[in-house]
Amino acid sequence: MGIIMETNLSEEERYIQARKKVENLKGFYGNLVAYIFVNAILIFINLYTSPQYLWFFWPLLWWGVGVVFHGLKVFEVFPGMGKEWEERKIKEFMEKEKQNKNKWK
């Protein structure tokens, strides 16, 4: 029975991880759509009101940098900052908290 429970827990954990990945992917695509839509409007406003000075370039550039980093994180391009790193940090912080509580007992 212990093996069955462990398999079910493993399946549940995989489902939770997959769901989190889907939510992260939806967040990235939402950010990308907003980036394209808002910047298209900014380009239009800029070219309509003051075509001699192209200020739309700045929000396009800096928001674009943010979108790129968001995409790199969602698609797990940074191997050093992946799930293993997160799990190690969580365990590290939990251990420090446990040690701090034991100091005062």
Image (cartoon, rainbow, N blue to C red):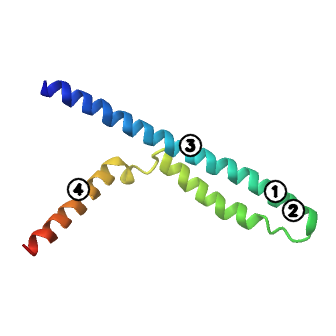
- Looking at marks 4 and 2 on the same chain, the residue that comes earlier in the sequence is marked by 2
Q: Is residue 65 visible?
A: yes
**Which residue bears the numbered disc 1?**
41
Where residue 101 sits, quadrant-wise, is: bottom left
User: What is the C-alpha distance between the residues marked 3 and 1?
Assistant: 22 Å
Q: Are marks 3 and 2 in contact (CB under 8 Å)?
A: no
Q: Secondary structure at mark 4?
A: helix
**Which residue of the protein is positioned furthest toward the bottom in this rendering?**
104
**Which residue of the protein is positioned furthest toward the front in this rendering?**
105
The 10 Å Cα crowd at callout 3, few under 14, some 14 to 19, many 20 or more, is few
Quadrant location of the N terminus in the rendered image: top left
- Going by the numbered disc 4, the residue's amino acid type is Lys
Label ID, residue 28: none
Quadrant location of the C terminus in the rendered image: bottom left
The 10 Å Cα crowd at callout 1, few under 14, some 14 to 19, many 20 or more, is few
Q: Are marks 4 and 2 in contact (CB under 8 Å)?
A: no
For residue 17, side relative to residue 28 (left or right): left
Q: Are marks 1 and 2 in contact (CB under 8 Å)?
A: yes
**Which residue bears the numbered disc 2?**
45
Please tell me which residue is depicted at 71% across the width and 65% down the height of the picture. Answer: 59
Q: Secondary structure at mark 2?
A: helix
Give 19 or 76, whichever is nearer the viewer: 19
**Which residue bears the numbered disc 4?**
91
